[in-house]
Image (cartoon, grey):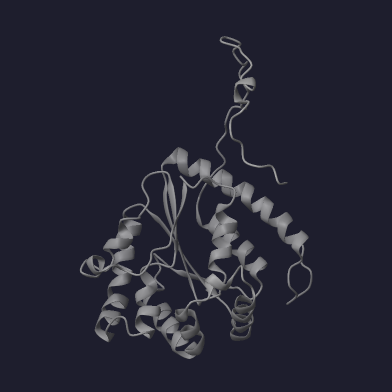
Amino acid sequence: MANDGAGARMKRKVYEKELEKLQVELCHLQEWTRTTGARVIVVFEGRDAAGKGGTIKAITEKVSPRVFRVTALPAPSDREKSQLFMQRYMEHFPAAGEIVIFDRSWYNRAGVEYVMGFCSKDQHQRFLSLCPEIERYIVDGGIILIKLWLEVGMDEQERRFKARIDDPLRQWKLSPMDLESYRRWYDYSQARDLMLKATNSEHAPWSLVRSDDKRRARLNCIAHLLKSIPYKRIKKDKVKLPKRSAKGRYDDQAVLKGVNFVEERY
């Protein structure tokens, strides 16, 4: 792959060229998944403004949402709080022929819930102890589990937060929780360290991606995803359009005269 200088931001043209190649491979992965009935979970974690959303969009924009399902759960309801902690996440686990992408996951307990005091220290410790066992159960059940942590630097996170403040198209991304996570940088760093130490197992390892350069991070994530799944290109017969039937032929545009169409402003 072309490199435009060590430490330099990747140029848009280079990025788009490489992204197109990877997205073609994602389409091949999709066909393999659908054909073989494979089940895949991809977990995206990282600090606020680390680039998770943009990376997930790059993965999913050229594939079917019926195969690549994105799950981004809101805060738990009172009913969900009374359930087993993993229960609401397992409801979204893949069936045959599906790849489920978690935009944040059960690791909320190791991050935001722990730092913000939404769970007790005992609940946090219990999660760290049991999580490798639960993930062993997932993997032993035949699901491919890929865990990605996007690591953004302090200065770059600040730059992105400031950009959100000034951009009306991105202000919705800036929540009170985001501001608090910005203030508690080192609390989140310590929570990350505890999580990685306890849950970086042989059967479900973490893979870290530096994301100060969003374009490089997206490409690196997709390349890692493709490398982590033993997919093969599925040979298919070339599609040919059938001949249109002329049976019942009539002027099907003339009957639309007088029907209300949207005003053509462009």
Q: Does the rendering let one see residue 1?
A: no
Image quadrant occupied by the N terminus: bottom right
Using residue 72 as the reference point, say whether residue 165 is left or right of it.
right
Q: Residue furthest left?
A: 82
Q: Does the rendering let one see residue 4?
A: yes
Quarter occupied by residue 212: bottom right
Q: Residue furthest front?
A: 258
Q: Residue at x 47, y 89 (%)?
A: 184
Using residue 138 as the reference point, say whether residue 164 is left or right of it.
right
Q: Residue at x 35, y 55 (%)?
A: 92
Q: Nearer the viewer, residue 3 or 102?
A: 102
Q: Residue at x 45, y 85 (%)?
A: 188
* Residue 199 vertical placement versus 97 (above, below): below
Q: Position of residue 261 (x, y in %)?
A: 61, 36
Quarter occupied by residue 71: bottom left
Q: Nearer the viewer, residue 202 or 169?
A: 169
Q: Position of residue 190 (x, y in %)?
A: 44, 87
Using residue 258 as the reference point, say whether residue 122 is left or right of it.
left
Q: How many marks?
A: 0
Q: Position of residue 66 (x, y in %)?
A: 46, 45
Q: Residue furthest top?
A: 247
* Residue 236 vertical placement versus 52 (above, below): above
Q: Position of residue 13 (x, y in %)?
A: 77, 59
Q: Residue at x 57, y 49 (%)?
A: 26
